[in-house]
Image (spheres, rainbow, N blue to C red):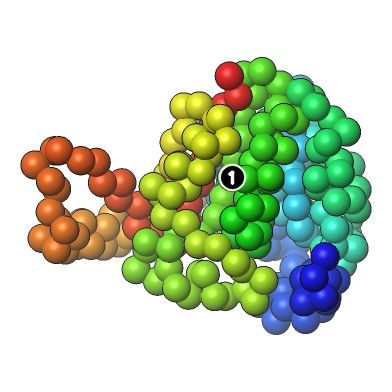
């Protein structure tokens, strides 16, 4: 591992997240409420599904999964600092390990693999290796959910450069392309749009709906629709998800 990666990953909490996140129980509870809405129709109904969160960081998504009743979950990450925060929040079944080494030892094992905010940290050749490793570790018919930054959003450059260790940015088209190259099927992308869980979030969601209409109108004028001779994928949120399945 390069020295800059090693130094940044080892001190990710103390030198970065401590300045941008509260890392409080309230933060995890808010994340849980949001995820209940956002992933309602994405994750399997079977609460015994075998799910792994690779590069799980401080365990926000695992906190949501475990509180939502998923009983067969695991998180792996290289950062001892982040895993310590996750452990403090009560997240269970964590392991400090290299994801490539771990996945290579568990072929065709998982029903669902979660990969939040990790793919943009790799070089292009590493991205193919990463996606191939996810594919191999899935059971036939298994699903991967990957979150990354949307470089085509209005403030895509901010997301790309918000972390010193980011290497590659994606648009919805390039995201889907590389996943199909790595044999994932039924690939779909969607944005991290606001979800409604109280009055304030409802107002925000309504304002975002209006804002999307404005941005879409601008793009329709600036780029056109190609008279339906080509397809344009409009995702305006600064963060997006891709979902794909193993044949």
The answer to which image quadrant residue 53 occupies is top right
Residue at 47% of width from left, 57% of height from top?
Answer: 170
Query: Residue 224: x, y in percent?
Result: 12, 54
Relative vertical location of residue 40 with respect to residue 178 in this rendering, above or below: above
Query: Residue 130: x, y in percent?
Result: 68, 45
Relative vertical location of residue 133 with respect to residue 107 in this rendering, above or below: below
Residue 7 in sight from this viewpoint = yes
Residue at 13% of width from left, 38% of height from top?
Answer: 228
Query: Residue 205: x, y in percent?
Result: 36, 56
Name the image quarter holding the N terminus.
Answer: bottom right
Count up the numbered dots. 1
Q: Could you tell whether 97 is left or right of 176 in the image?
A: right
Q: Residues within 10 Å of mark 1 (few under 14, many from 20)?
A: many
> Looking at this view, is 64 or 145 the one in front?
145
In the image, farthest residue toward the front:
125
Q: Could you tell whether 53 is left or right of 97 in the image?
A: left
Q: According to the image, label 1 marks what residue?
A: 146
Query: Residue 244: x, y in percent?
Result: 54, 32
The answer to which image quadrant residue 236 occupies is bottom left
Residue 44 in sight from this viewpoint = no
Q: Secondary structure at mark 1?
A: strand
Name the image quarter holding the C terminus.
Answer: top right
Q: Could you tell whether 46 is left or right of 197 in the image?
A: right
Relative vertical location of residue 38 with respect to residue 28 in this rendering, above or below: above
Residue at 76% of width from left, 23% of height from top?
Answer: 108
Residue at 60% of width from left, 24% of height from top?
Answer: 246
The answer to which image quadrant residue 64 occupies is top right
């Amino acid at each position: 591992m390069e020295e800059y990666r090693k130094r940044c990953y080892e001190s990710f909490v103390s030198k970065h997240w401590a300045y941008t996140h509260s890392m409080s129980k309230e933060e995890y509870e808010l994340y849980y409420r949001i995820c209940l809405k956002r992933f309602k129709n994405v994750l399997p109904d079977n609460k015994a599904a075998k799910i792994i969160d690779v590069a799980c960081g401080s365990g926000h998504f695992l906190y949501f999964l475990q509180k939502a009743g998923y009983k067969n979950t695991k998180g792996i990450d290289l950062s001892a600092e982040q895993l310590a925060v996750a452990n403090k929040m009560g997240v269970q079944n964590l392991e400090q390990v290299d994801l490539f080494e771990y996945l290579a030892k568990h072929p065709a094992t998982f029903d669902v693999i979660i990969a939040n905010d990790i793919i943009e940290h790799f070089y292009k050749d590493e991205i193919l290796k990463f996606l191939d490793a996810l594919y191999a570790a899935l059971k036939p018919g298994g699903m991967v959910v990957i979150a990354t930054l949307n470089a085509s959003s209005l403030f895509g450059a901010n997301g790309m450069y918000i972390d010193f260790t980011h290497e590659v940015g994606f648009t919805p088209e390039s995201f889907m392309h590389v996943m199909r190259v790595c044999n994932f099927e039924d690939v779909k992308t969607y944005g991290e749009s606001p979800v409604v869980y109280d009055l304030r979030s409802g107002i925000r969601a309504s304002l975002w709906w209006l804002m999307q209409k404005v941005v879409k109108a601008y793009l329709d004028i600036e780029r056109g629709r190609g008279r339906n001779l080509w397809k344009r994928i409009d995702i305006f949120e600064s963060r997006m998800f891709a979902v794909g399945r193993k044949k």
